[in-house]
Amino acid sequence: MSVGAPVRITVNGEETTVPPGTTVALLLDALGTERRGIAVAVDGEVVIRRTWSERSLAPGEAVEILSIAQGG
Amino acid sequence: MVLTDPTAATSDDAAGDDPLVIAGHRFGSRLILGTGGAPNLDELERALIASGTEMTTVALRRVDPTAPGSLFAVLERTGIRALPNTAGCFTARDAVRTARLGREALDTPWVKLEVVADERTLLPDPHELLDAAEQLVDDGFVVLAYTNDDPVLARRLEDAGVAAVMPLGAPIGSGMGINNAYNLAMIVEQASVPVVLDAGVGTASDAALAMEIGCDAVLLATAVTRAREPVLMARAMRHAVEAGRLARRAGRIPRRRFAQASSPSEGLADLGPSPAPGAASPDAVSPWPTSSGGPPGAALSGPPPGIASSCGPPGAALPDAVPPGGASAGGPPGAGASS
């Protein structure tokens, strides 16, 4: 992971900071999120599962991590 | 004497030769049970199993690390196919994005498309719905579209390429049953894709009626998950959908204004002279100004105007009057909401 200032992002509406170079996959690891039945969007665009480990997060980006939930 | 009824099919047999087919996929059950509203995952799992459903809707929401249990695990254990929805979306843009998230989360191109106009009614927004349906079909989705009980919109959705049209019986969660059986019958008559009654079902007879009108399946959630005994109601819905489907296939008798004896009128025993010489003949009490003396019932036995077949919505089952003040929880008017 590269050295530098922490990156300020928003995760599910809450501001947080992550180390520079943090990818979607690393963020999920850090949060301990169950990987099955979830989807991730960054700034409204879906990040395909197989690219989670390539997509790094830039300052100011808004990450949404969604899982299946009860619903009609 | 044969004591067993060779025509008595088990539920499995009934489904086995009469599958629901959506986008080439065969389902033995014509009941789609939503997961929304269940008090907990354990109750939900038991209701899902009791319902016999093979597909269940799920929503997409922000992950909640504090939420107990895993809905995904319930789906895995039961082997029930998940149908992600776009509930909570008010625009085509949001619905398309949510559908893509659902595809990603569950690795399925199937989506229950739901684009509503406002929180109070949760009625579909026709313009946004059609727009979203067109975009999603273009993007390769198998779209099951929750729609109004509007035959024109249903046709437009079908033209857009949806895999099923899912008209509401009444607003989501209202439990009011089928508010416009005539429109529903029109949608059924014109559709060349499966028609799934979605929303409004309050109790088993609503589901049976939908199937008798000719719907291919029923989708419901609240009626089961918020029933006092969800597992019992899930069983009731399973049987109601099966009964309604069988009745539809069997073909109901036409309605008649007057009685028609099912016992033969010939061969009656001679039991002596009538003791009542003053007894009125039927003609004497008939309020009908008949010229021939015959019963006028034949002219009234057909289906309601505008309904092509004897399978149209039964007039008697048109919406139960909801008394002003809405005291009833679905019971007959006057029964109140006690018990």
Image (cartoon, rainbow, N blue to C red):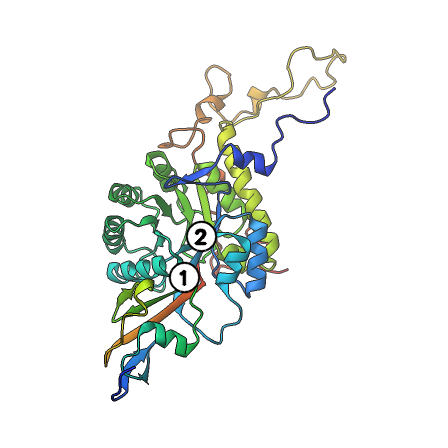
Task: Name the secondary structure under disc 2.
Answer: loop
* Direction from residue B333 to residue B82 in the image, left or right: left
The residue under label 1 is B59
Q: Mark 1: which amino acid? A: Ala
Task: Name the secondary structure under disc 1.
Answer: strand
Q: Position of residue B24 (x, y in %)?
A: 38, 39
Q: Is the residue B160 above or below the residue B63 in the image? A: above
Note whether residue B329 is visible.
no
Query: In which quadrant will I find the C terminus of chain B?
Result: bottom right
* Direction from residue B110 to residue B220 in the image, left or right: right
* Direction from residue B313 to residue A41 in the image, left or right: left
* Direction from residue B176 to residue B234 in the image, left or right: right
Callout 1 touching callout 2 (CB < 8 Å): no
Mark 2: give few (<14), some (14-19) or many (20+) Cα within 10 Å.
Answer: many
Q: In this view of the protein, which residue sits in the foreground, B142 or B95?
A: B142
Q: Are marks 1 and 2 on the same chain?
A: yes
The residue under label 2 is B200
Query: In which quadrant will I find the N terminus of chain B?
Result: top right
Eye-nearest disc, 1 or 2: 1
Q: Position of residue B90 (x, y in %)?
A: 29, 62
